[in-house]
Amino acid sequence: MQELDTVGQGSVRITRKNDNIVVIEKDLITEQMVLAMGPQHPSTHGVLKLECFTDGEVITEAIPCLGYLHRCFEKTCERVDYPAVVPYTDRLDYLAAMNTEFAYAIAVEKLLDIEIPRRVEFIRVIVAELNRIASHLVAIGTYGIDLGAFTPFLFCFRDREIILGLLEWASGARMLYNYIWIGGLAYDVPSDFLKRVKEFVNYFKPKAVELCNLLTENEIFVKRTWGIGMMPADVAINYGWSGPMLRGSGVKWDLRRNDPYSIYPELDFNIPVPDGKSSVVGDCLSRHLVRAYEMDESLKIIEQCLEKIPSSEGFNSRSAIPKRIRPKAGEVYARAENPRGELGFYIESDGKSTKPVRCKARSSCFVNLSAMKDMSKGQLIPDLVAIIGSIDIVLGEVDR
Amino acid sequence: MKEGQQMSQSVKESEAAYNIIQEQFGSAISVFDANETMPFFEVLDVSRWTEIALFMRDHTKLKFNYLACLSGVDYPTEEKVGVVYNCESLGIFNHKLAVKIRCSRQGGSIPSVAYVWHTANWHEREAFDMYGMTFTGHPDLTRILCPDDWVGHPLLKDYKVQETYHGIKVPY
């Protein structure tokens, strides 16, 4: 809506008559009101505060205030050994802890330059993709709640529970696993684990379709998200967006394919990108669709891994873990495709110490959220909720 | 990089990109460090950094349109703090290159690139928050993770936490 560009000067009222007619009245006498949304607001998905400057129903500016969940991750990293950082990385993106550990392990392994056993790589990919599905289920379920649909949330959490059960069986913890270690895994998976994963894949395939019918094709849901929170591809890249957010803007970019790591080059999967038929490319609905379709791709990846995984005979999940982890002097920036986008670790080693000199986590949510100020300009207040939900933030990763 | 060792493809791409920048800016930038894990160069003439960044973003053969990461770093032995930028050409050339800049530990400043890459806006605020260097030309250089009235910059190696904050004892 071009007319909304003048909203900054205030005094605009927007009314929606019916389907496609929007009436914009200008030069009304209004007053700017500051509305603090959060830090304890359910639709901010954690302790995020949005300082909204509103003019009637229209937001002239929404400024995100962060730091409520800052736990000095980077300072802590400089005080502990390399392997001891792993549990802290869990607490960054606590909805996808396997993926976060995976990214950190890749970064340190690049510095160490060690070979990882193939079975370890397969197990890592299986648990990471399972965790990706679990994370997307939370994203989709809570997005439904943000927009007033409670039922899909229950469906999502029912299926997520099965994944958490599986991962708990493998690692001993429900959410914060400490399972993927530098150079290996904490344990091999239990003997029947792969069979149960297979059962889950077969179980979840029809459920994913059911979820689509319930939410993605729901008319109310589509109306609340269609054309809202538009982000053109070039601006998204300039903002450093990644993951489903960037793909929602129509950029076919997935680190699993474009900057491959682990065994992803051997696997066959698609990168879902909105085609502009069932959504406007770059809107909230596109981002939601990318997440919904990505779950199917993750299932595909898991199935292929289950077929190709080497047997556990004579396998020791800790065989490649060095006795003393002390990388040679140097720096590395390594990243992995997380459910929320590119999670990168910049690690500097001095070659003498067993502790990183510097360990910076490049958080995907932090970067994705930084576009909030621009995206919220001229939006209605209920649409703001739709936009925050579509970014799918985890405050543990934003604030670190 | 050891003598005789083969350079990998990605490092070669980074070097090709570096050569274009080197041709334009000459002695303003350092020699290319061709290590395997993160090939980088350093900006020696700090005042020209915005110019270099714009050149990197807009040159037809470079197109570094994506700033993946921006990390502040402390170099206490040299009395300096610095910033590491991880740039990348997303979807066009796929080459990557890291850029390093250092400035004085006391009151040092670095030109802001928040208008070149929007990503830098929050990342520079974070670097300022954690290390205390200022970014000249930044639209809104305030603390981002710590409270506005926090004392000191936590990620400096010699950081001492304040005794009390609003009457609350801080060190536990």
Image (cartoon, rainbow, N blue to C red):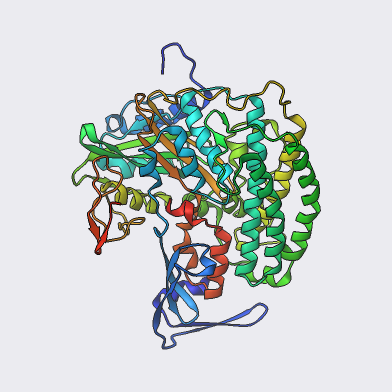
Furthest residue in direction bottom, as rendered? A29
Residue at 61% in and 54% down: A248
The reply, left or right, for residue A201 in relation to residue A333 is right
Q: Is residue B49 visible?
A: yes
Tell which of B74 and B63 is nearer to you. B74
How far from the left and from the top, in percent, is residue A308?
75, 30
Whether residue A130 sits left or right of residue A35 in the image: it is right
Q: How many marks?
A: 0
Residue B138, position in %: x, y? 31, 54
Whether residue B115 can be seen here? no
Q: Quadrant of the N terminus of chain B?
A: top left
Residue depicted at 44% across the width and 33% down the height: A82
Q: Is residue A92 above or below residue A265?
A: below
The correct choice, above or below, for B90 with respect to A386 in the image is above
Query: Residue A141: where, in percent of width, then height?
Result: 65, 62
**Residue drawn 43% across and 85% down?**
A27
Question: Observer-nearest residue: A241 or A300?
Answer: A300
Q: Is residue A197 left or right of residue A50?
A: right
Which of the pair A40/A366 is nearer the observer? A40
Image point (51%, 44%), residue name: A343
Name, please, the residue furthest toward the left. Answer: B106
Depth order, front residue of A339/B122: A339
The answer to which quarter of the image holds residue A300 is top right
B142 w.r.t. A118: above or below:
below
Q: Is residue A210 depicted above or below A302 in this figure?
A: below
Q: Position of residue A4 (x, y in %)?
A: 49, 74
Q: Is residue B116 left or right of residue A128?
A: left
